[in-house]
Image (spheres, rainbow, N blue to C red):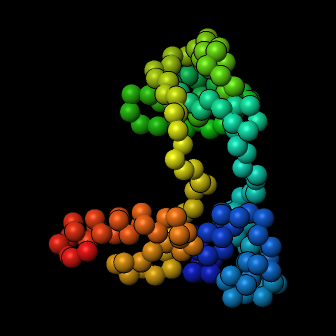
Amino acid sequence: MLEDAIDRDIVRLLANDGRMTYADLGRRTGLSISAAHQRVRRLEQRRIIVGYTATINPAAVGLPISAFVALTDLQPEGCEALAALAATDEVSACYTITGAASYLLHVHLADLPALDGFLRRLRGAVGAISTTMIVLATHFSRPPTPVSPLVDTGPHAKPAGQTAACTGFADRVEAVSLLAVGEDA
């Protein structure tokens, strides 16, 4: 669990920029460089921060097809099948889910024939595939940030770091929210 607002700010800042220096982190949170470093080290020791990674654009490296594949059963059961999926380059994530399917895979491939070949290999290796959904467009994608980016928690607070391009959208959402509760926009 996060100890205080400074820890929440550090987690939010590093989730958005994992390469942020301790000096910049300290400046943004009001801490000295040493104190920022100590806070990050404690967050790492408590396994709140578990690693740092580069986010790669799949299309830029020849993998423009993104799809979700729902699996109803895994054969062989459990860990062996999950280990096989984890070793498959095409699979970027595997989730246990509720509903008709048991697992949801997020895959990235070069083209539709590659997706077809992957699905054939998958069906033979780990069991039934219930649904395949191809992503047509990604409107936004970001790493999960378990803390709210709101600096003001009042009823009309706006997200911190909101860009000018998003301002109109946020204002329209706020106006709709206000109308929904009977206030004048």
Vertical placement of residue 126 versus 21, above or below? above
Q: Quadrant of residue 177?
A: bottom left
For the point 73% across and 77% down, the residue is 25
Quadrant into which the N terminus falls: bottom right
User: Residue 132: x and y, percent?
Assistant: 50, 24
Nearest the eye: 130 or 38 = 130
Q: Is residue 17 left or right of residue 124?
A: right
Classify residue 94 as left or right of residue 170.
Answer: right
Q: Is residue 167 above or below residue 82?
A: below
Residue 83 visible somewhere in the drawing: no
* Picture coordinates of residue 83, whole percent (x, y): 69, 30
Q: Residue at x 77, y 84 (%)?
A: 35
Closer to the camera, 6 or 166? 166
- Of residues 129 and 66, the one drawn nearer to the viewer in this rendering: 66
Numbered label tally: 0
What is the quadrant of the C terminus in the image?
Answer: bottom left
Against 151, residue 137 (above or below) is above
Where 63 falls versus 49 (above or below)? above
Q: Residue at x 38, y 81 (%)?
A: 154
Q: Residue furthest left?
A: 182
Q: Residue 20: percent from the left, percent from the top? A: 76, 70
Q: Position of residue 167 (x, y in %)?
A: 46, 69
Front residue of this view, candidates 9 and 77: 9
Residue 92 location, quadrant? top right
166 relative to 38 in the view: left or right: left
Q: In this orientation, does residue 58 appear? A: yes
Q: Residue at x 52, y 64 (%)?
A: 165
